[in-house]
Image: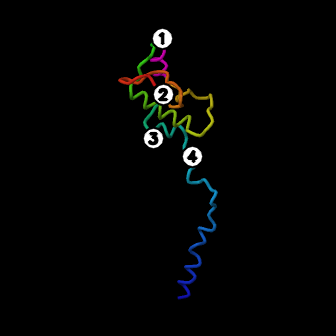
Amino acid sequence: MIFLFRLLLLLPAPLVLADSSSNAVNERIPVRKAEMEVHWKVDCAGSWATFVELRDRAAGEACTMPAELQRQLQLCAFIYQPPGEEVTHSYPDYRAATGTGGGEGLCQQAGGREK
């Protein structure tokens, strides 16, 4: 009986010790960007080079981006320009290329209209 009483007294202890203002649940797991590329089977440098070639070939006219390239660039945007983080200019602007940053996309998706 004493054991049960002690157990009941200790159960709320983790709740009291937990920091209610902690944002630990919403933090991103620290993973290197190269590891995320491998995990998602994406080559961001290669995808960007393909995009630049496609854009340059269009020579100022609307270019058509294959859906697979669009997806690759969206993943690259998540890796290198995650939501909620400041934009750095050390990486290509994947968001602008895909139109996921709220602006106009630099190409249109194949079979779709310009973003």
- Local packing at callout 3 (Cα closer than 10 Å; few below 14, some 14-19, many 20+) is few
Q: Amino acid at mark 2?
A: Thr
User: Looking at this rendering, what residue extends furthest in the bottom direction?
Assistant: 1
Q: Residue 111 magenta-drawn?
A: no
* Residue at the (38%, 24%) spot, across then down: 112
Which residue is labeled 1 in the image? Answer: 59
Mark 2 closeness class: few <14, some 14–19, many ≥20 residues within 10 Å: many
Residue situated in front as seen by the camera: 41 or 6: 6
Q: Name the amino acid type tagged 4.
A: Pro
Q: Earlier in the sequence, mark 1 or mark 3?
A: 3
- The reply to whether callout 1 and callout 2 are in contact (CB within 8 Å) is no
**Residue bearing the label numbered 4:** 30
Q: Which residue is mark 2?
A: 98
Residue 16, numbered circle = none
Element at label 1:
loop
What's the residue at 43%, 36% (across, down)? Answer: 41
Asked whether the residues under the numbered discs 4 and 3 touch, taking CB atoms below 8 Å apart as contact, a structural biologist would say no
Q: Position of residue 35 (x, y in %)?
A: 50, 40
Dot 2 falls on a residue whose secondary structure is helix
Whole-number angstrom distance, CA of label 4 to CA of label 1: 40 Å
